[in-house]
Amino acid sequence: MVRRWRAVPDSATVQDAADDRAPNLADRLGRAAADRGARPALIWREQTLTWSELDAAVTAVAGALAGATTGAGDRPDRIAVALPNTPDFVLACLGAVRAGLVAVPLNPGLTARELRHVLADSGATTLICTADVRDRVAGVAAELPALTAVHTTPPTAAAPDRFPARGGEDLAVLLYTSGTEGQPKGAMLSHRALTANHEQVDRIDPPVVGPDDNVLLALPLFHAYGLNSGLGAVLHHAATGVLVDELGPDGGLDVLARHAVSVLVGVPSMFLAWSTADAARVTAALATVRVAVCGAAPLEPAVAARFTEATGHPVHVGYGLTETAPVLTSTLVGGEPKPGSVGRPLPGVELRLVGPDGTVLWPDAGPEPDDDPDEPDLAVESPGTDPGEIVVRGANLFSGYWPDGRGGPDADGWWPTRDVGYADEDGDLFLVDRLGELILVNGFNVYPHEVELVLDAHPAVAESAVLGAPHPRTGETVRAYVVPVPGRSVTGAELLAHCARNLARFKCPTDVEFVDSLPRSVIGKVRKTQLRSAPAGLRPPAPAGRHPEVPDVQ
């Protein structure tokens, strides 16, 4: 249940939140300005914005955006923002929210074709972006009739006496998914959903973020993880955000040390950089850290162990999706990270594991049937439940996909994530795979992640990706894409033999293709659709965008 809060902002131009609606991010900003006006809100390079300064700047942007709205139809204008992690991004997004409009954060590294799709699909009327994005959009502007204004800095103007009151089920942010299963779709996140996720995290003891924390904001703010778990947490708690648009190969150790960062919100590549950097520098740079959280993609237990050995801090792992605003589970809930686990559901999040026939496998599973010795072992070996689809319910869930709410929670509030996982005897969740990536070989289930773990265990394999390929006899067969360790020699035949020693025959790849790198989304997830659509022998390019290893972070 979402707690209700009435905003008491400092500025008369910001309308109070009504008692019957969840507060929005701009309401939180107003309260922070009233309570902690002289405290730093954002630090970026050598620039510091206090809460009062940030509040005033956001109001000026909101005034310009409100004055330029088209008022077409019965929906608030969508304001697209394609900027890196700079104060301008924060001003543009919060300005849109304060003006009662809808923010559409976009990756500034998108191609012209990708920008055309998202801008046309969202019907954005205004775009605030980098000069490079402006030039890309200029080439497709004729196909974007709704787009009436493009700015390379957030516009400003005098604010009206009052802005429209927005909150609760009103749409706040339209976030486009990474498109791992096709064209990106706009997930509609309401003010209620964004606020609820903070309410849920707040029920973890000890607190994850507090008003005296300096929170690292190095994850791309155009992604749900960086936007709400990072920037949103800073706003919710009136903490201080340390904005970083380029971490560098050492994970920004100098930035962490200079600004006494106390909460790390990161992805696996960041923890890999920290775990392999000079131990003395890491110890000094992370001396003020009290919480380290990793999400967005699987974290190798060995990397977590090296980070803990170097810093003395455990790495807490979480799991979530854009559609869940974004956090669903965390090892912070149980208190102790468990290797390979993504933890337990947040307080206020209900989670089930459901079988293909709709049977609830966990937590309400009945007695397990006797094993049939004649049946092949299709399940990923685990000390707990059989794998099932993760189905969730909670106030943090999205309202469906733009524009009509399709694909959202059902009438009872449950939403199938299409992720597969199992729970151990302690109730800790382990991810297995995406349901859509399940491979059926002669009707037998093959979970790609299980095969990838075997491949990655070979000393000559840096990383791998496994997917299904059509086969005339078995329906599908297992195809592996492998990035070899630099300087190590290995053949496809050797890897096939390695798999045969460690996997049942139907799970073994029948084909291995060596590639220089795996295509990834901005949060580090492998884009298997790009591998599937690439001609044989094509070496996938490294991800584009300003953020190299880490935040090019979906």
Image: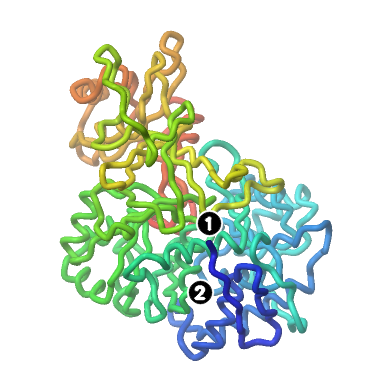
Which residue lies at the image location 33% right of the left edge and 50% below the top edge? 342
Q: Quadrant of residue 59?
A: bottom right
Residue receiving disc 1: 396
**Left or right, residue 122 beside residue 491:** right
Question: Crowdedness of circle 1 by 10 Å Cα count: few (<14), some, many (20+)?
Answer: many
**Left or right, residue 412 beside residue 65:** left
Question: Crowdedness of circle 2 by 10 Å Cα count: few (<14), some, many (20+)?
Answer: many
Which residue lies at the image location 79% right of the left edge and 74% below the top edge? 67
Q: Quadrant of residue 304?
A: bottom left
Q: Which mark is residue 20?
A: none
Residue receiving disc 2: 235
Depth order, front residue of 185/272: 185
Q: Is residue 290 above or below residue 537?
A: below
Precedes in sequence: disc 1 or disc 2:
2
> Disc 1 or disc 2, which is closer to the eye?
1
Mark 1–mark 2 distance (CA, rounded to whole Å): 17 Å
Q: Where is residue 152 drawn, in percent x and y?
A: 65, 68
Farthest residue toward the top? 473
**Left or right, residue 378 beside residue 521:** left
